[in-house]
Amino acid sequence: MKRLLLAVAVLPLLLTGCGGSAAPQTKSADIFAMDTYMNLKATGTDAEAAVSEASDRISALETLLSVTQETSEVYALNHANGAPTPLSAETQALLQTAAEVRAESGGALCISVYPVLRAWGFTTGSYRIPPQAERDALLAYADDAQIQPENGSLTLPDQMQIDFGALAKGYTGDAVMEIFRAHGITSAMINLGGNVQTLGTKPDGSAWRVGITDPMHPEQSLGTVEVTDRAVITSGNYERYFIGEDGRRYCHIIDPATGAPAENGLISVTVIGTEGVRCDALSTALFVEGTAKAAAHWRQAGDFEMICVTEDGRVLVSEGAAADFTPRSGLQTEVLRREG
Ligand code: AMP
Ligand code: MG
């Protein structure tokens, strides 16, 4: 009996002893980083420290990975003039995922397409339609197969420049989740400019409901997907684009086969999976691959689900996502089956 009383007395001390108050709290932060609006929300006894450390990590990753900041590692790589640049663990991991997804997408993901992207004005804001000869000249340097890190450093071939825009936010989301887990957070949702990543369930134990933007009408939702411990990452033609003098829309995802914004039948691809960096790289790759190749890629890979919208308005939902996806009322969807 005496021992039991002692145990009861010690318990509150343990609960309040480290990391502040014992009651779980929900903390949230709005941040502008990596050229986009971000929101972090976490619930736990140490949520405040977790969110604050995560915000710092996002800033640090932006400083490391920005293609335009002259102090970044990516900038150093792109301006090394043939000298080897030592790679951080972060860039090594990003290069690894980029290489994997490049291989499985038949080159649709191409981080060295950056000079072409810039010629279209996507990182400078000076939008224009570069002549085909200019695109072809720049495409000559877009070849990820030549990116070969050695002993922790990388020398890019002359004229080649890279950009992790296709996967940096997913990587950042994974880094935030790692910090959250280290702080004992069991319930969190983050939105990094349309890239949503979730940890555990909502505080009430139910699944997170993530809205998917309708690319035809970005102010409305296509529907919601219910997830726990998943990344839900979208590449869409509505996210960043300009209207050319010819009245056409040109989006920020470049098809390395043409040097022009990808137009292979898809206007939005949402990838659902466990690892943010992979889902982010995949969303960009599948967008470039287009309707038929994206479906084949999904069947082949087996570790992610997807919701695609075609330019003619079809909504294709992979069979593993169908049960978790609730389309908005009246919206027709087609289920992609693994067999046939
Ligand atoms: P996301 O919004 O994740 O699809 O990423 C789009 C970003 O990836 C663009 O803003 C570019 O920085 C970069 N990007 C565009 N096209 C490609 C491509 N084919 N392969 C790799 N990165 C690309
Ligand atoms: Mg992406």
Image (cartoon, rainbow, N blue to C red):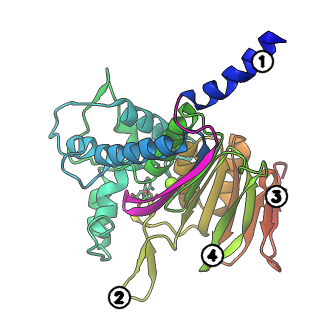
Say what amino acid the circle numbered 1 marks.
Leu
Residue tagged 3 = 322
Nearest to viewer (mark 4 / mark 1): 1
Q: Which residue is located at x 43 percent, y 46 percent?
A: 52
The crowd level at tag 4 (other Cα within 10 Å; few <14, some 14-19, many 20+) is some
Between discs 3 and 1, the one toward the N terminus: 1
For mark 4, give the secondary structure: loop
Q: In this view, does 295 lie to the left or right of 58?
A: right
- Per the model, the C-alpha gap separating discs 4 and 3 is 20 Å
> Which of disc 3 and disc 4 is earlier in sequence?
4
Residue 293 in view of the camera: no
What residue is shown with label 2? 245
Instruction: Give the residue at mark 4.
Output: 311
Q: Depth check: 269 or 191 in front? A: 191
Image mark for residue 106: none
Magenta segment: 18-41
Q: How crowded is mark 2: few (under 14 residues within 10 Å), some or many (20 or more)?
A: few
